[in-house]
Image (tube, rainbow, N blue to C red):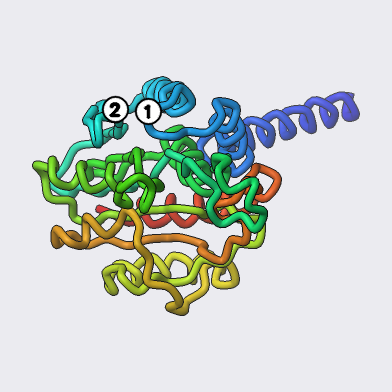
Amino acid sequence: MINRRIFFFVLFILFLATACTQGKNANNFSGDQAYQYLQTLLDFGPRIPGNTGRENAAAYLKTTLEENAWSVTLQDFQFDETPLQNIIAKKGNGDTLIIVGTHYDTRAVSDQENAVEKQDDPVPGANDGGSGAAVLLELSRVLEVPENTELWLVFFDAEDQGNLNGWNWSIGADYFVHQLQERPSKTLIIDMIGDEDLNIYQEKNSTPSLVTEIWKVVEDLKYQSFLIPQFKYAMMDDHLPFLNAGYSTALLIDFDYPYWHTTADTIDHVSSRSLQIVGDVLVQWLSEQN
């Protein structure tokens, strides 16, 4: 009888442990799940503004965000007669508006290729245009928006076509900022954050107080070897339209990525561990916004 009681007691403890683990995993950011989102995005092919791959990727982003219980608005516009689309997902209510953004388009040509014959090929965009979108999708699955806070996850089109056929950089973000009717308290842009050898430095154009705030989270999580507390680059990216409009904005980017704007920007050079690290930072930072 004693052995039988012990047996059922052990079963009960195992059941509780399994239930707690499942519940924890259901509510925690998963780099592996983000990696799966990334793989799906890459299955659509290059996401060049105006092409079918970009349109299918946008439809997938919208559907996934809605499945994760976010209110989604499609911001359609044109540049140089090319149809473009920003995707805006909203959740929460309150006086504080936080925006986390990334771009999801991919560069039409691989102009950083050493081999001349490859320079006209499109960039696959696993890290550049894919990693940030995958992290935002995973955020949409697990995130609990703080009280008195409205959070927007924004996916920008046409960030990565600068200096091609007379196009500028960050066309989607620039259009978004000019249409913005509400003033965000803080904006964080992420780009190229999935490199298997993750080295995100503090970015020189970013709002200093926001950089300090984010790196306090990095320190708390002991991620300083991945998000390095040193300034290195001053970047042209989707944060600049926000900064030019006077909004507090920071950029997280790993620009030490050897496959930037090449045909080798593929998923085998992206790590789920890197997606996990950035996701952990974002979840912790956002949880403190109230």
Query: How packed is label 1: few (under 14 Cα within 10 Å), some, or many (20 or more)?
Result: some
Residue bearing mark 1: 50
**Can the viewer see residue 103?**
yes
What amino acid does circle 2 point to? Pro
How many numbered circles does the render carry? 2
Q: Secondary structure at mark 2?
A: strand
Please state if 35 lies on the left or on the right of 54 as rendered: right
Q: Quadrant location of residue 146?
A: top left
Query: How packed is label 2: few (under 14 Cα within 10 Å), some, or many (20 or more)?
Result: some
How far apart are the alpha carbons under marks 2 and 1? 6 Å
| 118 or 224: nearer the viewer | 118
> What is the x, y in percent for residue 118?
63, 46
- Establish if 245 lies above or below 96: below
> What is the x, y in percent for residue 75?
23, 30
Q: Quadrant of the N terminus?
A: top right
Q: Residue furthest front?
A: 117
> What is the x, y in percent for residue 205?
31, 70
Mark closer to the chain start, 2 or 1: 1
- Establish if 148 lies above or below 284: above
Q: Secondary structure at mark 1?
A: loop
> What is the x, y in percent for residue 11?
78, 28
Please state if 165 lies on the left or on the right of 178 as rendered: right
Residue bearing mark 2: 83
| Residue depicted at 59% across the width and 37% down the height | 25
Q: Quadrant location of residue 124?
A: top right
| 225 or 107: nearer the viewer | 107
| 227 or 170: nearer the viewer | 170
What amino acid does circle 1 point to? Gly
| Residue depicted at 63% across the width and 52% down the height | 116
Q: Look at the numbered discs 2 and 1 and tell me whether their residues touch, using CB distance below 8 Å.
A: yes
Q: Residue furthest left?
A: 181
Q: Residue furthest bottom?
A: 230
